Image (tube, rainbow, N blue to C red):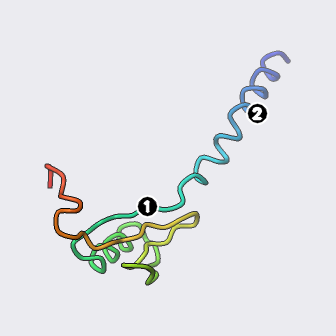
Amino acid sequence: MCLFRSSLILLLSFLPSLVFAETFFTHMHMRVPDTAESAAWHSELFGREIEPHGPGPDILYHNGNIATMVNEEGLAPPSAAA
């Protein structure tokens, strides 16, 4: 009985963090050279819908979106690995 209570207390302690783990993501801005190509690639890779919105198309998720934006000259240089 003590093991059951300990397991139940442990489960109830971590349950809120498990439930809310996905709800903190709302959106992300991604600067890319070609917004339409990037949105199409992400849509195909993750199986998500594209919605025209803002400066570039958005990739929609159930709890947020990834907004694509044109990378203006020198604003967000590519990473060293690119």
Residue 29 location in percent, x, y? 39, 64
Q: Is residue 40 left or right of residue 49?
A: left
User: Is the residue 59 above or below the residue 27 in the image?
Assistant: below
According to the image, label 1 marks what residue? 28
Report the residue at 28% width, 73% height from top: 70
Residue 82 location in percent, x, y? 14, 56
Report the residue at 57% width, 66% height from top: 62
Name the foreground residue: 80 vs 71: 71
Q: Marks 1 and 2, Cα distance to the nearest angstrom?
A: 31 Å
Residue 37 location in percent, x, y? 27, 78
Corner quadrant of residue 78: bottom left
According to the image, label 2 marks what residue? 12
User: Is the residue 32 above or below the residue 19 in the image?
Assistant: below
Element type at marker 2?
Answer: helix
Q: Amino acid at mark 2?
A: Leu
Report the residue at 74% width, 25% height from top: 7
Q: Nearer the viewer, mark 1 or mark 2?
A: 1
Q: Is residue 39 left or right of residue 6?
A: left
Corner quadrant of residue 76: bottom left
